[in-house]
Image (cartoon, rainbow, N blue to C red):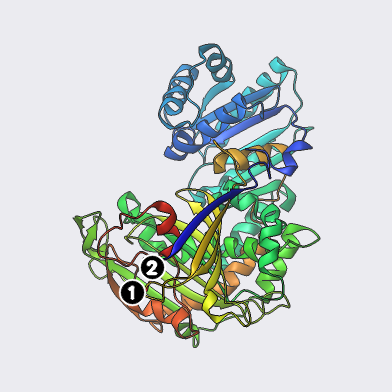
Amino acid sequence: MTLTRIIVICKAYSQPGMRQSERRRTLEPTTFVLFGATGDLAKRKIYPALYNLFVRGKLPSAFSVIGLGRREWTDETLRANVEQSLRRFSRTKPDDEAALGRFLQAFRYCVLDIGREADYQRLLKLVKEREAELGIPENRLFYLSVGPEHFGPIADNIRSSGLGSGRGWKRLVIEKPFGHDLASARELNRKLGESFAEHEIYRIDHYLGKPVVQRLEALGRHPAVRGLWTGRRPANVQIVADESVGVEERAGYYDKSGALRDMFQNHLLQLLMMTAVHLPGGGSGDVHQRKKRIMEALRPVTKETAAACIVRGQYAEGFIGGSPVVGYTAEPGIAPDSQTDTFIAARLEIDNDDWRGVPFYIRTGKRLREKSTRIVVEFGAPEGQPEHGSDLLVIEIGPNERVTLQRGVQFAGSAEGIEQVSVELDINGDNSPEAYENLIGDALAGDPTFFAHWDEVELSWRWVQPVLDAFAENRVPLHRYAAGGFGPAESDALPAKDGFRWWLDDRSDAKSDKSEGERYVCQSNG
């Protein structure tokens, strides 16, 4: 009988909710100018993040928030909407009415049409009035929670209006997408560069804000993790971001984007960079420069060779959680002949001394069996111990965050009697900050470590562009896959060609009733 043992170690390895950089940061009084204050991202993520920073004592002592939008709101309307968002979406509920009141008092609202120059002059007047009222320097953080088509015009107006010419610092925070292809990304960067220096631009990739991702460097130094690399190299690395949801209300955006642009070019290549620079044991030097060198070492593809290492798919009808769902082309707002990819799997290689010969398998898709974002580093059996099975370092990023070492793991159907040990490394603690808390806190502190630098963005697009060209010329087949599975069967061939399989996919027809520990160790695609 297979033995599963769970050992929890390192409970105090890192302080809950604290990264090394937080212990040395100084937060200066700041005016937080939020474009898109009436939008969904502000409601779901930005306001809760600011509030949780506030209750944790991670906001500047003097702090002003000016929300902008086209709706005819008042200060009171904005504050009421902020309070509503906190009660619904904040991980820390606003039960302390006095603290909530102090937080809401920082908020002001200004009506602004992005293209109307006079509105920026009115905004500048309000900003200066608040700075004088609070007695704070002209430190201004501009957060653009708006569509990417507005990034350039807003940056231009910030410069021309004088909003960006204060005696303090200025910073610009933008959300993805950073371009639609290589050419548009370069043009966007050129436009932003007319108003902001590179060190003033903070490109948010919320995957980089995940606590477990921000602690990869510490994880790489852990003795148990370093021990995996002793005398051997990884057999392969798997980076998976499966989603059970479909396109939902994003049809207008998604059908012009697809999985390659929406997930692969940004989130998954960023996870690849972070994994490669921090495991094992990290390295020395600037993180951005190290990530840049990883992308420079990523073996390129051409549009002629893309089909050999890329699998793309589009979901058809099927079942999610036992309920029927329609296929992609039957979704509202999607053309019946759409060729947009909703699934991407790829085999990549990093041609440097640390990772040469170690394949990286990346997979992402919509309408898959379950939501899971994870990094799995597989080590083959130690030399002379073929019966040992594989050792796995499993880094769960979502929906739960957890790091485990799984020793002597066999694929389903293999010989029993092998001792399988799972060691759980607790590096986060309970009630860890959410991604936007970490990232907004970093932007306020002027810490760019976990933001995407332009060099990384450009190199990512440079790698992806030939794949986009191959898709446009139909050089890579678009495979249909039933909703509720694990994507096209062709994606299994990517690791299979090298003698590997995707780890931790539960390919059984019914969910197992086994304990979580047993499930976690034994799941595979056997």
Q: Secondary structure at mark 1?
A: loop
Residue 424: x percent and y percent? 56, 52
Q: Give the image quarter of residue 126.
A: top right
- Pointer 1: residues within 10 angstroms few (<14), some, or many (20+)? many
Q: Amino acid at mark 1?
A: Pro
Q: Give the image quarter of residue 319.
A: bottom left
Residue 398: x percent and y percent? 47, 51
In the image: residue 9, left or right of residue 321: right
Q: Amino acid at mark 2?
A: Phe
In the image: residue 413, left or right of residue 494: left
Residue 165: x percent and y percent? 74, 36
Camera-nearest residue between 270 and 143: 270
Q: Which residue is mark 1?
A: 488
In the image: residue 235, left or right of residue 293: left
Q: Give the image quarter of residue 21.
A: top right
Q: Residue furthest left?
A: 324
Q: Which residue is mark 2?
A: 343
Q: Is residue 35 visible?
A: yes
Mark 2–mark 1 Cα distance, whole angstroms, equals 8 Å
Camera-nearest residue between 435 and 464: 435
Q: Which residue is located at x 41 percent, y 58 percent?
A: 518
Q: Is residue 88 above or below residue 353?
A: above
